[in-house]
Image: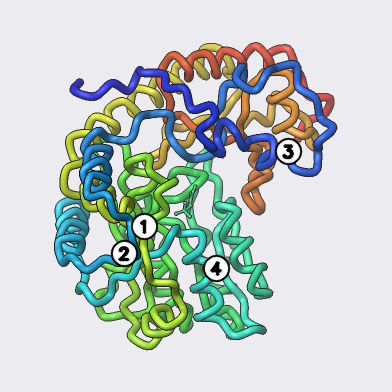
Amino acid sequence: MKYNFDEIIDRKNTNSVNTDGFREYMFKGRENVKFPYKDDEFVRMWIADMDFATPPEIIEAIQKRLNRRILGYSQVFDPDYYLAFSNWTTRMYDWTFPKEQLVTSPGIIPALYELCEYICQPDEKVLIATPSYAYFQSAVEFNELELVCSKLNDEDGHYAINYEDFETKAKDPKVTLCIFCNPHNPTGRLWKEEELRKVGDICLRNNVWIISDEIHCDLLRTGLSHTPFAKLFPHSDRIITCMAPSKTFNMAGLMFSNVIIPNKPLRELWLRRHYTFKNPLSIAATQAAYEHGQDWHKELLQYLDGNFKFTDEFLRKHLPEAEFKIPEATYLAWINIREYISEGEDVKVLFAAQAGVLLEDGNMFVDHGQGYIRLNLACPRAVLEKGLQRISVFLNSHRPSMSV
Ligand SMILES: Cc1ncc(COP(=O)(O)O)c(C=O)c1O
């Protein structure tokens, strides 16, 4: 390997949410809770950023831009940015889009908040599939819209759309938008073309816009490939695609994401209301990621494959009653630990206090996540091993008082 994913990098005192902000982010309102671990003794497997260094090619591009020494107001003027990104989408997903459809946002979360506001009228509803990334719910509810959830079918750890339920909900004339996670966080499903076509047909037939959140689309197990939702419906202008270098290259703090809006009036509304200036370091970094990040990305996927294999073997051996399938996408492990915990237990606090591991409780994923934990596996193997060991020691000594 050319890049070192085993390196353990100290993130303390870098204003990182992962290391310096976890108390406020994870345990807000529970200030009294005390843990027998110092902050730097926790194994952190919660928020979805990686413990790997951002690729050197990106750091160099930032340094090169810094050497120009003036960091004044900036926007994306250089056509090479579009070229870099559209070459990436062509190479990776055999799909591209016209330049004028591309706008950028400080993140996908702010884009979701804005798009809900622009697309929906005040009394309308937004459809999501659950379990779901919780910010889908926050964006909907912040805009005082009604959230409608369609539970995914859980077929022995393989999640699938319940088309009948989904269509019944999409048929409600007040449902005007679907926020769809492709690939899916937290289950790691990489939706097949056929599944996307069915969901797309249902939505478009019922005049439901689609925001396809594709932030995890570069984080696939080796050999698999991603289908952008919009690629399957080239004649529709009602599918908005959100993609970003943030997860792929571990640069979420640079706050630069791509939003592809084919519908002209919606795009014009976005451009009128959106603050258009950008961070010049983020522009340089993102362009470099798409132009020069491919080798690093390939090695990252190999390393993640190894982490998933390690986790799978570990769980089978040490926590045989946990249900886990290596996901097709994301660097997140969605693990059913129902046999080890009781309903109503505060899983996040329990793991922090008794195992010294920071992780996400399935209940944080809107609905239908009870009994699950989500672990971030994008960390050096030694850290992963330590985290899994702590989890297994804790769970094997902690039996549920009643089944969930
Ligand atoms: C599905 C999904 N969308 C969006 C985000 C965050 O997007 P951003 O950091 O670009 O706001 C995440 C982060 O975990 C995510 O999983």
Is 55 positioned to the left or the right of 90 in the image? right
Residue at numbered disc 2:
74
Res 142 → quadrant: bottom right
- Where disc 3 sits, the SS reads loop
Q: Position of residue 296 (x, y in %)?
A: 23, 34
Q: CA distance from mark 2 to mark 4?
A: 24 Å
Q: Which residue is mark 3?
A: 27
Secondary element type, mark 1: loop
Of discs 2 and 4, which sits in the foreground?
A: 2
Q: CA distance from mark 4 to mark 3?
A: 24 Å
Among the two numbered marks 3 and 1 on one chain, the one whose residue lies closer to the N terminus: 3
**Do the CB atoms of the residues marked 1 and 2 lie less than 8 Å apart?**
yes
Q: Are marks 4 and 3 in contact (CB under 8 Å)?
A: no
Q: Which residue is mark 4?
A: 113
Q: Which badge, 3 or 2, is on the more N-terminal residue?
A: 3
* Rendered location of residue 260, percent (x, y): 32, 69
Task: Tell me the CA gap for discs 3 and 1.
Answer: 31 Å
